[in-house]
Image: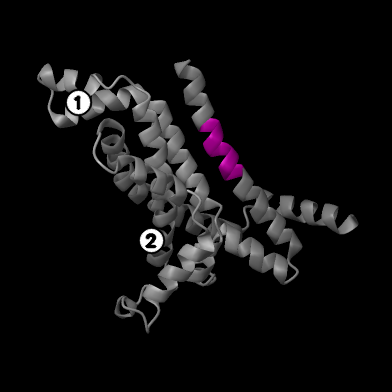
């Protein structure tokens, strides 16, 4: 047990002195996962509104597929995209493999189904007459969409937080598509796995504490706004 307490103590010291390596890894993680979440929101929010407000043939099947995609294995997504981005793959000429853009693409694939499904469920729970009523009263599609958004804003915030939490904590795509390159594609999760594996237990603990801190902070923000609205 002594090595555990020693590791925790050393980790606290690293965090307290704002270790440069930890800050760089933290920045890379937030940059990649934050960018992926923004792209996933740009896709998932409109898609969720359309699915939640529309009724068309095959919608139930599409919802089932969407719910299934929420549990996509990260290593499977990483493997599929690796095959696309590798030099022998169809997109190899783009030279994306082992870069941050490749990691963003992988995390977008993971986050989009979650955000879309949760927004769809939230929109389905409101009065469907809100949209046509807003249009009847002279509001354009954008204004009507904002009206609907006002009814589900907390649910949308929770959906975005869930999407971000999914990608900031994943390791499969980040490792396979980023390659865990120091100073370039090393994220919190890949660094934890790598540093712990080579015996740098203190650094692994420090990075784990930082990762947990981010997750708790995101959830705290969601809970804060939910409490204020209540």
Q: Can residue 73 be seen in this snapshot?
A: yes
Nearest the viewer among 183 and 39 is 39
Asked whether, in this view, residue 216 is left or right of residue 91, the answer is right
The residue beneath circle 1 is: 144
Residue 214 magenta-drawn? yes
Asked whether, in this view, residue 224 is left or right of residue 90, the answer is right
Residue 4's tag is none
Residue in the image at 58% along x and 58% along y: 188
Q: Residues within 10 Å of mark 1 (few under 14, many from 20)?
A: many
Q: Quadrant of the N terminus?
A: bottom right
Q: Can residue 14 be seen in this snapshot?
A: no
Write down the quadrant of residue 82 in the picture. bottom left
Question: Which residues are the magenta region?
Answer: 213-221
Question: x, y percentage for residue 66?
Answer: 40, 47
Q: Residues within 10 Å of mark 2 (few under 14, many from 20)?
A: many
Question: x, y percentage for residue 35?
Answer: 38, 52
Q: Earlier in the sequence, mark 1 or mark 2?
A: 2
Residue in the image at 39% along x and 53% along y: 36
Residue 21, above or below 136: below
Residue 17 magenta-drawn? no
Instruction: Name the dominant secondary structure of the magenta segment.
Output: helix
Nearest the viewer among 206 and 48 is 48
Residue in the image at 24% along x and 19% along y: 129
Disc 1 element: helix
Question: x, y percentage for residue 65?
Answer: 40, 49
Write down the quadrant of residue 19 in the picture. bottom right
The residue beneath circle 2 is: 105
Disc 2 element: helix
Q: Residue furthest bottom?
A: 88
């Amino acid at each position: 047990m002594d090595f555990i307490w020693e590791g925790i103590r050393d980790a606290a010291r690293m965090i307290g002195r704002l270790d440069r390596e930890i800050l760089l890894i933290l920045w890379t993680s937030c940059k990649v996962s934050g960018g992926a979440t923004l792209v996933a929101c740009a896709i998932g929010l409109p898609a969720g509104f359309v699915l939640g407000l529309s009724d068309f043939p095959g919608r139930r099947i599409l919802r089932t597929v969407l719910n299934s995609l929420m549990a996509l294995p990260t290593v499977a997504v990483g493997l599929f995209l690796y095959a696309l981005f590798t030099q022998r793959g169809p997109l190899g000429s783009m030279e994306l493999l082992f870069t941050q853009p490749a990691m963003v693409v992988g995390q977008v694939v993971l986050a989009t189904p979650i955000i879309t499904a949760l927004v769809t469920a939230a929109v389905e729970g409101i009065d469907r007459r809100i949209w046509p009523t807003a249009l009847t009263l002279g509001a354009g599609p954008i204004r009507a969409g904002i009206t609907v958004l006002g009814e589900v804003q907390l649910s949308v915030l929770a959906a975005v937080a869930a999407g971000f939490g999914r990608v900031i904590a994943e390791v499969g795509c980040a490792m396979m598509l980023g390659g865990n390159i120091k100073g370039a594609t090393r994220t919190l999760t890949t660094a934890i796995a790598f540093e712990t594996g080579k015996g740098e237990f203190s650094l692994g603990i420090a990075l784990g504490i930082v990762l947990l801190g981010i997750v708790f902070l995101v959830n705290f923000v969601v809970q804060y706004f939910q409490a204020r609205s209540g």
